Image: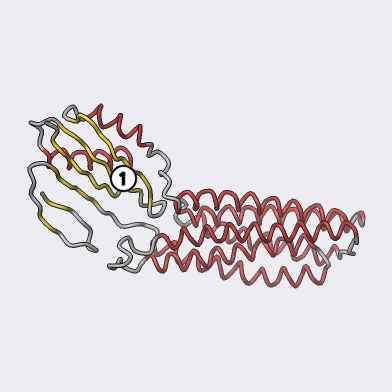
Amino acid sequence: MRIEHNHHHENKNRHTSHAAGHHNHFHSNSADPKNEKRMALAAILTGMFMIAEVIGGYISGSLALIADAGHMMTDCAALSLAWLGFRLARRPADWRRTFGFDRFAILAAFLNGISLFGIAGWIIYEAIKRFGAPVEVMGLPMLIVASLGLVVNLLVFAILMSADRENLNIRGAVLHVMGDLLGSAAAIFAAFVIMMTGWMPVDIIVSVLVAILILRSAWYVIKQSGHILLEGAPEGLDRRAISADLHKHFPQIIDVDHIHAWSISQERPMVTLEAHIKPDSDIEETARAIKQHLHDNFNVEHATIEVNRRH
């Protein structure tokens, strides 16, 4: 019986009359060079304007601008960590990390989600303080900085949309930038209100709205990355559905058990299972067919199949 591996593993032959193990390995696309380059460019642009927005917020006295800068800071950190994750994912697997470094990008996404909760909490805390002690906000500097922020966010959004949008870090970054776009638009609106009416509380209201956007992004990123880190089943890989489907397509199968589905990263779903077949069925052919069926019908790029004859 042939055990198939990718180039990180050795090929071995094993023959047995009772059980057969069959594996298939595919490369992750998380290390796609276009993802890495676009992420680096987006991180640089976001980081540079974040500094400008902090300065503009300080000069104008606008909490909304500082809040948006806080969001951009977490975006910059997320983009930088994701870039590092893509960089590390290019490193080959070794004897200690047999699946390579793909999980680093997932860990980076999870840590970024937690950081977003922290920055949103700080913004809400500052907004509450300002309700008791209003701060004079300069409308024109606020308008100029917020407008420039909108342009930068549109540019970063276009860069990320040209990358691999199926990647969790790319999807998370796109959500963050969409939040920044809304934050910049809200800051522009607040600046107009202040310039036209002098009503300062609008700055506090907008900053709280930005904080809510940040919390929404944070929950999405933590939920998705946490599910992968907890070895949760990937979307579309219900083990009950897998069992029913195999029984339907393989009449030689008597029973399927020990089904486990998880993923190393969002691009690398994994399945292991044990199939019990009729005594006169071919073990090796059944293992190969099940593996191919999982790949074609469930998009499983790594499967370990154990097949046993049941007498």
- Image point (54%, 54%), residue name: 172
Residue 114 place in picture, x, y as percent: 59, 58
Snapshot quadrant of residue 117? bottom right
Q: Is residue 255 left or right of residue 282?
A: right
Write down the residue under mark 1.
271
Task: Count the marks.
Answer: 1
Question: In this view of the protein, which residue sits in the foreground, 26 or 140?
Answer: 26
What amino acid type is highlighted by mark number 1? Val
Q: Is residue 109 left or right of residue 186?
A: left
The answer to whether 197 is drawn above or below residue 296 in the figure is below
Q: Secondary structure at mark 1?
A: strand
Residue 208 place in picture, x, y as percent: 76, 53
Q: Is residue 119 left or right of residue 56?
A: left
Snapshot quadrant of residue 131? bottom right
Residue 44 place in picture, x, y as percent: 57, 70
Quarter of the image for the C terminus: give it.
top left
Residue 219 place in picture, x, y as percent: 59, 50
Question: In this view of the protein, which residue sits in the foreground, 85 or 271?
Answer: 271
Q: Dot 1, crowdedness within 10 Å: few (<14), some or many (≥20)?
A: many
| Residue that lies at the very extreme toward the front in this rendered image | 311
- Image point (30%, 66%), residue name: 93
Question: In this view of the protein, which residue sits in the foreground, 13 or 18?
Answer: 18
- Image point (38%, 54%), residue name: 264
Picture colour scheme: secondary structure
